[in-house]
Amino acid sequence: MAKKIGKKELARKSLNAEVDRIVAQTGTGSESVIPILHAIQKRYNFLPRSALQRVCEITDITPAAISGVSTFYSQFRHTPVGEHIIQICTGTACHVKGAELVYEAFRRELRISGEQDTDPEHCFTIQRVACLGCCTLAPVVQIDGITYGNAAPRGVAHILQDFLTSKPAKQEEQLLEHAFSDNIGEIRVGLGSCCVASGSAKVRQALENALIETGIHTSIKRVGCVGMCHRVPLLEVLVPDKDPVLYDKVQPNHVKDILLRHFKAKSIPKRITNSTLRFLENIMYSNNLGNYTRHPLHTRDPQITVFLDRQQHIATEYAGFIDPLDMEEYKMRSGFKALQQALFDYSPQEVIEQVNSSGLRGRGGAGFPAGVKWSLARSAKDKIKYIICNGDEGDPGAFMDRMILESYPFRVIEGMIIAAYAIGAHEGYFYIRAEYSLAVQRIRNALEQCEQAAMLGDNILNSGFSLHLKILEGAGAFVCGEETALIASIEGKRGMPRYRPPYPVEKGLWGHTTLVNNCETFATVPWILRNGALAFAKFGTEKSKGTKVFSLAGKVLRGGLIEVPMGITIREIVEEIGGGIEGGKRFKAVQIGGPSGGCVPAELAHTKVDFEDLLNVSAMMGSGGLLVLDETDCMVDIARYFLSFTFSQSCGKCTFCRIGIRHMLDILEKLCTGKGDKGDLEKLQELGIKTKERSLCGLGKTAPNPVLSTLKYFREEYEAHVKGICPTKKCKSLITYTITDACIGCTICAQKCPTDAIPISPYEKHEIVQEKCTKCDTCFQVCPHDAVEIH
Amino acid sequence: MINLKINNMQLTVAPGTTLLQAAQQLNIEIPTLCYMADYEPYTSCMLCVVQDIKSDQLLPACSARVVNGMVIETENEKVRQARKDTLDLLLSEHLGNCEAPCMRACPAYMDIPLMIRYIKERKFNEALITVKKSIALPAVLGRICPAPCERGCNRKYLDHTLNICLLKRFVADVDLYSDKPYLPVCKKDSGKKVAIVGAGPTGLAAAYFLRQKGHSCYIYDSNREPGGLMRYAIPDEKLDKNVLDTEIQLIRKLSVKFHMNMTLGKDISLAELRQNYNAVILAMGTINRDSDFVKDIKVFSRGILVNSRTFETNLPGVFAGGNAIAEGRMAIRSLAHGRFIAHSVDQLLTNLPITGFPRRFNSVLGRLTVDEGEEYAKQADKSATISPQKGIMQGYLASEAVEESKRCFRCDCRKQVSCKLREYADRYHASQLRFKTGERKKFSLVVQHESVLYEPGKCIKCGLCVQITEKAGEKFGLTFIDRGFDIRVAVPLNENLQKGLEKVARQCVEACPTAALALNNHFEVLEDVAT
């Protein structure tokens, strides 16, 4: 017994020492609570109660604060978890591509039952997460930070095996070191999150190995997102005096052959294999004029041409060929020129005038004119002012902010410094979603470089202007995208919004004047200053100027990250840039604006991308998620999906958002399970309108939009659900799977069925045992004779 | 300074003033739940919305600031509807009963939980007075009542309902056989006279309550002895007629005049009664449809037609109840009619609008699971039901009654009078069922504090207690846990409530707009308008 107590005592002491060490690094102020919790969880995989108690003992953080905060944010766990954590992305794109089936398949494979979330061996803990931002690779699964794209229910065993056998090291970024004096040309590897998720890190590894093996001296260059996420991993080879060549969907075993095609090996070259030769037939050529042109790709591939031609890169300037963290390259491409202009040629007032006359509106969703916000912040009499970059992109199905932060960290920082100069702020924060670890890493790295180069800190570039920027990582709360909630979160509180006015420009962080802008807004500012407000205002419509970045995903042929001029129509985006619907299906609708937005039906696809025009069709610009839906998508299910998202993200403060959304969701769930009643649709609509009108913040005020817009445009689908019919055969409770006479008894379905609901009967027609069927759709997908029917 | 108009009244206030404060300057009351002076407005309940006429927006008055030229209306149709919507939503997740289900099930609307509490404290006299506020003949009813109240008792979800009827009989007997049985105080003579036809339970009860209001009562009955069916239809072995006589004697002592062997339509006419009395109550039991008074009064298949709330007939000043309006088997129902008619008649005689017996808004928890029964049982005795040692016919001994009373779940609300949610639910005619779309949450009780009872299901998440404990520097205090629909108030780090509320328990209880936080031994009694 004595020994046992001794052990306990020892454990307590070591835990205390660990917490003390963490606190020493993060600080003891009440605002440090989120970083402290992150650090404790990183160390223990969850938040031990005794660790939280220790924090309260040695900091200003109260028990009420630590319990309140740690239970508010969904990233924090209060119970121990398995050795590895499987995160199933439940973003919109993943949802429409069957994420729920993948989730269930993992649970079956790992024998996790009932309320449990961890397998019996405590090896894996499974959880659904909000969007991981790799929408073009949907469905996406992340295990301990390793991302797997295009997951299918039948592939889960394979994914687990791959994870356990390869156990890849944590993806950590280093600047690539291949600096030989005789380096010829360069090879660009896309290393945005989508690329990495599709295996570009492995491609890079293979590339490095191949360089050593072949003795070729060339530089490997990491580039940010190219935008063509539907073709990742991408690899581009540049050799002087020759056309650049872009390879898509590259596998590690292709790499050496690609190398040998362009460079002379110092060691003995291996023969190019037949398979690779065949593969090389499909490459895409690009013949731009060199490294430093404004238009990166002028390709002969018609698909690429349409994908890129309609786009206009401002926030994403130099997409695909700038190294995100190479400050020198950024400078060579006019980086920090706008900052110099602002600091030395313009007064703060003149900067604001430029932004004002450019017509730039906030890109976070609501579209408030940026110049107006800035001048309000400027004219505020507060001596202390703050600037905040809102990178808390939480919409399922949107990944613009992630991509901008990952690919153009210097541009965002530059825009922020300019804004800070304009309003007179000397301190600021990046508030970035914790799920975006690569973005956090890159911004951190870029901030360090800026400080070293005197672009940040005291007396920037000897201008006399000073600005200090810090990063705060969110912890899983969509509502923190709302500026007052975001500010509460930075202050170390639960992310609960408060009533506005007073707006943050009047009373923000710690009660001081605060300017909050979205990172895309900041990323646009340097271009405006360099090219002039009028050049920017040339793009777009009367009231919505410039360009907008969208993440195009869903049932579209070419998904990816696009930047288009305002005023482009939805049809142009879907059909020209996106290449239309995949699989020859009929275009049904576009969900625009995520959980705050609405569904624009195909008949209204001539609607322009414009803040007001979108509102007029019951949608919303939102932050820029653009999800394409085809005829197989159930609109009631889509509405339920978005509402269950906002339901899970509501902070729970105001009555209508907390309870009204619950009741709306109850009704939708009734409809999707065939329990709808007459009058449900009217009640749904009434609750939707009232919740919109009477909620406190933007979350509640927009949460009913997906429901109201689908009710408006797809009411007949709702009415069918009231009668117990799902016209698109998506709602599981309303459908059954059967096997028709076309079955030849090949037994594939029986072999693949994860629940043994199909007894094996070779050469005979198979039958599905309905009681066992989980409607996972596997049989339907694998049947080579289309003998599985859904009713 | 800022100029604005509220409810068509012009006023000038300092910038930064909230609409609520501005309205207060005009003595305009705006209902609030989550707001408390001297604390940060939290803007969560949305009850205080008012309409900004120019923008047609609803603004939360607690937080919205005045703007020059604003035109505000604080109580128009749109605002009232918005407040009702808010209340309906809050009530849709409100887990609790305002009044206990036993009380709601009692036709006479007797405050059963209060009676039980008095018995538990051995305050038998107070218990009897509580009973007699609703039931004129409790000793009789204690013997013959089929006790619908017991069917409402929540204890049945755990083991066996309380023997409410036996408890009532116990307090009634103790009083009846005492040296000086209880007689209610009667107001001084009003000079008004009421004729009551029928000396059965309805008539006796009506006389009992009308006398207390100071009105003279004259009972006409065709039988030789008063009591109606209680005397003539119930066998002696079930009801000892001495008990009936003794209880009627107590009513007689209130100066009620009895005219026996008088039959309406034969010995006396309705017209005569209407002429000679200020009001007439028809409580003669099942009506004889051949009788000539039926020609003047509207009847339908079941009996005399009355307004179901006020018991008025089509003839002004004439009321009817008991079996005269519909046949029923329960004496308690007829007795209850007598009580409610007395209320209406008193309104008539004091020149008030006749509204009927007031019923307040009632939150209803509904059926319990066994687990939820266990939650309630945290504050009740676990013992099995107590059977009278001397047999049912003899009733409880004092010790048995006290033991049985300790089994009560106390499922009525500790703040049934002071609860702001209930007050506003009444004011805005809220409905708890309007938004009933799914399963309700699980009921739970936190019985950890020496004086405070916490009912999470009654919490409207206003956060006042969180703010109060923070401001007071409680070591643990209270905090919000989780978010969204699952958000709840709890003591941080899973500590118990005793540790959470060391300094400001009483303040939190007082600030709590509902009974989520209440003093455990606190109870409130509605001032009974009928007595």
Image: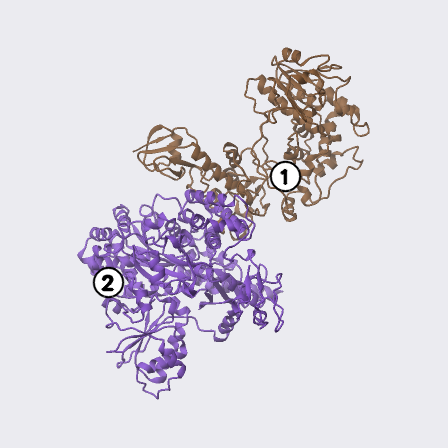
Which mark identifies residue A268?
Answer: none
**Residue lying at 18% horizontally and 58% vertically, measured from the top left:** A344
- Relative to residue A401, is residue B438 drawn left or right? right
**Residue lying at 36% horizontally and 48% vertically, measured from the top left:** A615
The residue lying toward the viewer, choosing from B42 and A411, is A411
**Residue lying at 71% horizontally and 17% vertically, measured from the top left:** B291
Drawing shade for chain A: purple
Identify the secondary structure beneath mark 1. loop
Alpha carbon distance from label 1 to label 2: 72 Å
**Residue where numbered disc 2 is placed:** A336
The residue lying toward the viewer, choosing from B396 and A588, is A588
Residue B475 visible in the snapshot: no
- Relative to residue A162, is residue A136 drawn left or right? left
Q: Amino acid at mark 2?
A: Phe
- Write down which chain is painted brown: B
Relative image position of residue B287 (x, y in whole percent) = 71, 21
Q: In which image quadrant can residue A23 be found?
A: bottom left
Quadrant location of the C terminus of chain A? bottom right
Q: Amino acid at mark 1?
A: Arg
Identify the secondary structure beneath mark 2. loop
**Residue where numbered disc 1 is placed:** B410
Q: Chain of mark 1?
A: B
The residue lying toward the viewer, choosing from A318 and B476, is A318
Above or below residue A185? Residue B519 is above
Above or below residue A669? Residue A557 is below
